[in-house]
Image (tube, helix red, strand yellow):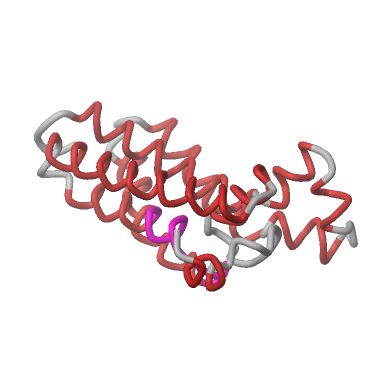
Amino acid sequence: MSPVMLQSSITNDAHFAGATEIGPLLFGLTGSERVSSWLNIAMIAGALISMALVFRRAPKAEMFHLAVVTFFSLWFVYHRIYDAVICIVPAAVFADLIVRDRHRRIGVACMAGLALFAISIPGLLTERLHLSAESLAANPAGFAGLHFERLLVFGMFCWLLVLLWKFRSGRP
């Protein structure tokens, strides 16, 4: 990796560089910007390959494709929490799952997960409860709380890929 890329990387702020970007979580887990950057690149490459395979397998599920791409765009690049407004696309997909009564539990669970963006768990912990980010990062539950939105976005991205894979071909 070039030194210029490492210098321009925002993963060196382990807490709030981007609210949904996966890089700071990887940096928090590894403690190394170089390792976290390489992991990030590997995860992006793996995600692109996975999306190509899954989209090819379920070509008529365009709304699901858009939802997956929405989550991908949120976790692979720098965003602030207000950029999560684009989650309206996945919310429509989850609402459709609920209304059509296909995978209703998944739809309800994911809608509840999206609703947690309104609370902003990291902000709740640090700004409202006045817990320091350093003390939270020192234990696993606090660390998960600091990176909750990152984990949520990445988890929903993976979950939608699995769901799409199960659809095989045709419209879900």
Position of 45 with respect to 115 (left or right) is left
Q: In which quarter of the image is residue 9?
A: bottom right
Q: Name the residue nearer the viewer: 125 or 5.
A: 5
Screen quadrant of the N terminus = bottom left
The residue positioned 74% from the left and 62% from the top of the image is: 123
The residue positioned 42% from the left and 51% from the top of the image is: 41
Q: Name the residue nearer the viewer: 171 or 142.
A: 142
**Which range is magenta?**
71-82
Position of 161 with respect to 106 (left or right) is left
Q: Tell me where residue 122 appears, x and y as whole percent.
A: 72, 57
Screen quadrant of the C terminus = top left
Position of 91 with respect to 129 (left or right) is left
Q: In this view, does 43 lie above or below 33?
A: above
Predominant SS along the magenta part: helix
Q: Tell me where residue 65 appears, x and y as whole percent.
A: 24, 50
Q: Name the residue nearer the viewer: 46 or 70.
A: 46
How many badges with numbers are in the image? 0
The residue positioned 33% from the left and 47% from the top of the image is: 45
**Is residue 124 a member of the stretch shown in magenta?**
no
The residue positioned 41% from the left and 44% from the top of the image is: 43
Q: Tell me where residue 32 appears, x and y as whole percent.
A: 65, 50
Position of 94 with respect to 35 (left or right) is left
Q: Tell me where residue 106 appears, x and y as whole percent.
A: 42, 33
